[in-house]
Amino acid sequence: MEGIITGSSRKGLVFTDESSVNVRRYGKLKKEKDEFDGYNSDNNPRKNSPVITMDAPHLDPQMIADNSPYDSTLSPSSKSPWSSHMNEESSTSNDEALVGSLVREEGHIYSLAATKDLLYTGSDSKNIRVWKNQKEFTGFKSNSGLVKAIVIAGEKILTGHQDGKIRVWKVSTKNETVHRRVATLPTLRNFLKCSMKPSNYVEVKRHRQVLWIKHYDAISCLSLTEDHSLIYSASWDKTFKVWRTSNFKCLESMTAHDDAVNAIVVGFDGLVFTGSADGTIKIWRREVQGKGTKHFFSQTLLKQECAVTALVINGEGTFLYCGSSDGLVNFWVRDTNLEHGGVLRGHKLAVLCLATAGNLVFSGSADMGICVWKRSTLNNEHTCINVLSGHTGPVKCLAVEKDPDAMCNERRWILYSGSLDKSVKVWKVSENAATGHGGHNNNQATRLSVDSYTRELPRVSSLRKMGSRRY
């Protein structure tokens, strides 16, 4: 069940293939008939206990079982899946090092969120686990299964699920290891109120109508305004919805794209960016109207054949980055009225996730690697200073935070990477790392043949689950 996966970092190696198009995509994971709920004291898998459900044609009751206590026996401290270790050479010679690995036969890792000294991990099991100082700290259950998104809004933890619901959790004031579900969006009250009016139902498929406040397909991502007053949820149902954080009321729903919305980020100047499987990035302008909001379509920033898979805006709000299923990362510059800044070519397969920290950009891919890009403050050129390897499956999610051990003027970060190989890895990354021999920027890339790169990649079953533009 548990063990350590070793990793390495390949400085200066860059891989590109301009002929790779629309390449490979991941479909929905087929839910297994019997999901696993951790392990018992005999280290044997234990199947889920029965879930109590309520049948109603329109109601969306909150599940009492979501608030069931976290069973600490599923992951005793004596059998912690975290194995922290430092590469002996890294402490003296390398700025990048694999610090620790988590391996648990509990499901693919789909979402990560880091706050202060805690790391939240979501997978296609019903357990959301919490880690502290690279040791398992606590966890909480959600009977929805796959957790596709986690964001932190102050004292609230928001999780987006494949069942189309958002769940809101808070840490108990009496016991910091206890997380209680305080709401499920849409709330039951909001659901009942809206269900009374026939005009609140919209047709989503032939002979099928749903309330406009409810996602009828999987939630792909979540985003927050800077003041945490509004929650944005994007879904495979082609819409994004806006929720008020104070009372969890759904304020607005926008049919944004012709296909699944894979990514959404709240940007600068009241702008919202959405990326879709239809190959477009759209910009929406937010206006406050009374107690609600109204979003207006502004422009299409990108239109291409391959799916848009990930979006991120850097911390200063000056650059927008987009990952695509063709393995490319495009970026736009705010200071030049969102002029296209260039293309970063470092992956052979789809870019599945993006993250930024300081002048660094991280891109995780289905090719199992993580490219570390450094942006020049002089001309906005991006150089690949490292390729972090070690995962044996596609890298699905990234989270980054400031390294607490860094000196005052040292720009060093802790990077977390979650993969479909069912592991989470922890890396230390520094902006001071020198570009290795063969490093490249977006204007002049060092090339390696497709065949030579492909031979370096282990074959895993996850790579054969292709065919969908949804991520």
Image (cartoon, rainbow, N blue to C red):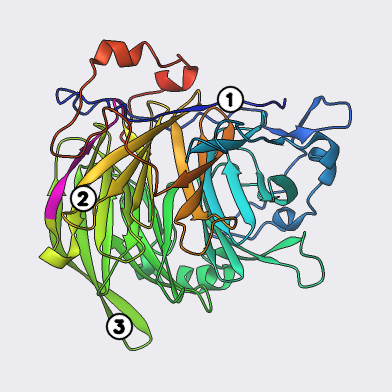
Q: Residue at x 60, y 28 (%)?
A: 32
Q: Is residue 200 left or right of residue 113?
A: left
Q: Residue furthest front?
A: 92
- Residue 244 visible (yes or no): yes
- SS at circle 2: strand
- Residue at the disc numbered 3: 288
Callout 1–callout 3 Cβ contact below 8 Å: no
- SS at circle 3: strand
Front residue (pair 270, 217): 270
**Mark 3 or mark 2, earlier in chain:** 3
Q: Position of residue 136 (x, y in %)?
A: 73, 46
Q: Amino acid at mark 1?
A: Thr
**Residue 47 figure quarter:** top right
Q: CA distance from mark 3 to mark 2?
A: 28 Å
Q: Is residue 319 left or right of residue 3?
A: left
Q: Where 184 sits versus 98, above or below?
A: below
Q: CA distance from mark 1 to mark 3?
A: 50 Å
Q: CA distance from mark 2 to mark 1?
A: 32 Å
Look at the magenta stretch and give its main secondary structure: strand
Q: Position of residue 241 (x, y in %)?
A: 37, 63
Q: Amino acid at mark 2?
A: Phe
- Residue at the disc numbered 2: 331
What segment is highlighted magenta in the picture? 340-349
What number is the disc on residue 80? none
Q: Amino acid at mark 3?
A: Val
Front residue (pair 342, 253): 342
What number is the disc on residue 6? 1
In the image, which is nearer the foreground, mark 1 or mark 3? 1
